[in-house]
Image (cartoon, grey):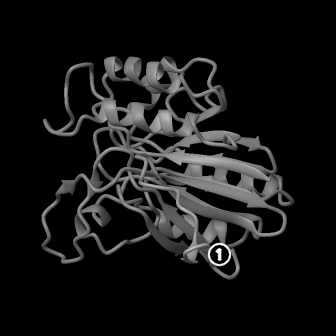
Amino acid sequence: MTLIAQITDLHLKPRGLACYRVSETNMLAERAVEALCALDPAPDAVVVTGDIADQGDPREYVVAREILSRLPMPVYLLSGNHDHSAQLKEAFPGYPGLDQGPADRLRYAVTIGDVRLVALDSSVPGAGHGELGPEQLAWLDETLAAKPDIATIVAVHHPPVLTGIHHMDAINLRDGAAVADIVAKHAHVERIICGHDHRGIVATCGGKVVTIAPGVAHQVVLALKDDAPAQFNFEPPAYYLHHWSAEAGLVTHTAYVEKADGPYPFWAGEGVAWPGY
């Protein structure tokens, strides 16, 4: 069994500043880390699928390092459109995978328990949309082909699919069709995991399941009209737990950062247990 936690879109700010003036992203990230540290069993690793910083400011990466260093398990970082890949690499020396690839890209392949993680850098400096480009797409194909016998998760910040949220689809991954062509050739790819859209969304790409994780801070408003404005709200922050086993493959659970009432036992009546429990 392998358990991987995924958090995304932290949008950390310099100390004392709120994101978009109202979202206390630093505090919300700290709560998410506390929730991860309390998990039993503990995840084998945490994957952070981009937008770690809000403006790619070096001060934001100081905050990120302070918060994420509290996690006792390996942490794997990706770059999003709000990040600066080179500065992110410099801010996290020694973090697994970051010694691979070019100095200005977060691109690597690692093994986590029984699962292989192939991480891509979809950030485009100065732009909101994502793009991998021919060189990175070729690397993806070669990297997947190199180890066809291990279950593989492809991680990328920008989703390679359309979601129906128009203003987010306008800044999704521009070469998603090329990703679909590549992953369709590799039977061992179990999942594509993404961030960026600040909502829990499930889709397919090249015959593979795509799971887009909710944010651990604010969420994008669910609005499926083409002319809907770009807005966010404070629906409950959440993260994903990806559970892999030989029997079931990869199964993903939505977990909420904040604690809810309970747990309570299932009872049919006074002193009578519900059948099956």
The image shows residue 68 at horizontal and vertical percentages of 50, 27
Q: Work out whether residue 111 or residue 276 is closer to the camera in this orientation and state it.
A: 276
Question: Is 217 left, or right, of 214 in this rendering?
Answer: left
Query: Where, quadrant-wise, is the C terminus in this rendering?
Result: bottom right
Q: Which residue is mark 1?
A: 273
Kindly give the residue lying farthest to the front in the view shown. Answer: 270
Question: Is 96 left, or right, of 225 in this rendering?
Answer: right
What residue sits 41% from the left and 35% below the top?
31
| Quarter of the image where one finds residue 80 | top left
Q: Work out whether residue 114 or residue 268 is closer to the camera in this orientation and state it.
A: 268
The image shows residue 216 at horizontal and vertical percentages of 39, 45
| Quarter of the image where one finds residue 199 | bottom left
Question: Is 47 left, or right, of 88 in this rendering?
Answer: right
What residue sits 66% from the left and 31% below the top?
73
The image shows residue 28 at horizontal and vertical percentages of 34, 37
What residue sits 81% from the left and 50% below the top?
114
Question: Is 140 left, or right, of 116 in this rendering?
Answer: left
At label 1, which amino acid type do we have?
A: Ala
Mark 1: few/some/many CA within 10 Å (<14, 14-19, 20+): few
Regarding residue 141, the answer to whether it shows in the image is no
Relative to 96, say whether 265 is above or below.
Answer: below
> What secondary structure is marked by label 1?
strand
Regarding residue 91, the answer to whether it shows in the image is yes
Relative to 51, say whether 179 is above or below.
Answer: below
The image shows residue 120 at horizontal and vertical percentages of 56, 47
Q: Work out whether residue 15 or residue 42 is closer to the camera in this orientation and state it.
A: 42
